[in-house]
């Protein structure tokens, strides 16, 4: 029930005058984007969970509840 309430709150949050849910519905999921990094010339690839021209999401799970612990874990990985 708590997870549903959080999801509903996020979905109804306004962004650019519209609920985030509308952007999510219009988005591509698991979108892969290829590009060449201009400084190194390396060919790169990113995969976003949700891609929309106005807003994109790439969600991560974590074992940690604080930003500091999450950052430390992200750097370690």
Image: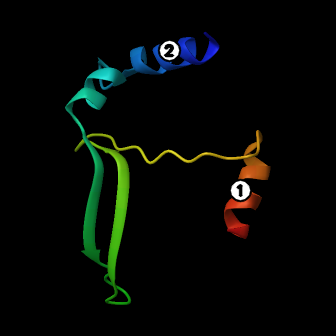
In-image side of 29 versus 2 (left or right): left
Q: Secondary structure at mark 2?
A: helix
In the image, 55 versus 7, the foreground residue is 7
The quadrant of the rendering that contains the C terminus is bottom right
Height in image: 67 above or below 42? above
In-image side of 70 versus 10 (left or right): right
Where residue 11 is drawn, which disc sits there? none
Height in image: 22 above or below 43? above
Height in image: 7 above or below 64? above
Mark 1–mark 2 distance (CA, rounded to whole Å): 25 Å
Crowding at mark 2 (Cα within 10 Å: few <14, some 14-19, many 20+):
some
* Colour logic: rainbow
**Furthest-front residue in this view:** 1
For image coordinates 59% across by 18% down, the residue present is 3
For image coordinates 34% across by 76% down, the residue present is 44
N-terminal of the two: label 1 or label 2? 2
In-image side of 63 versus 15 (left or right): right
For image coordinates 77% across by 41% down, the residue present is 66
Q: According to the image, label 1 marks what residue?
A: 71
Crowding at mark 1 (Cα within 10 Å: few <14, some 14-19, many 20+):
few
Q: According to the image, label 2 marks what residue?
A: 9
For image coordinates 61% across by 9% down, the residue present is 1
Q: Secondary structure at mark 1?
A: helix
Q: How many marks?
A: 2
Where is residue 12 drawn, in percent x and y? 40, 14
Where is residue 26 drawn, in percent x and y? 20, 31
Where is residue 37 drawn, in percent x and y? 33, 80
Where is residue 62 drawn, in percent x and y? 67, 47
């Amino acid at each position: 029930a708590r997870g549903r309430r959080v999801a509903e709150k996020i979905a109804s949050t306004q962004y650019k005058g519209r609920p985030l849910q509308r952007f999510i519905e219009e988005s591509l999921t698991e979108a892969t984007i290829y590009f060449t990094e201009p400084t190194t010339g390396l060919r790169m690839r990113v995969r976003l969970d949700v891609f929309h021209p106005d807003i994109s999401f790439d969600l991560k799970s974590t074992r940690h509840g604080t930003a500091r612990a999450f950052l430390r874990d992200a750097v370690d990985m």
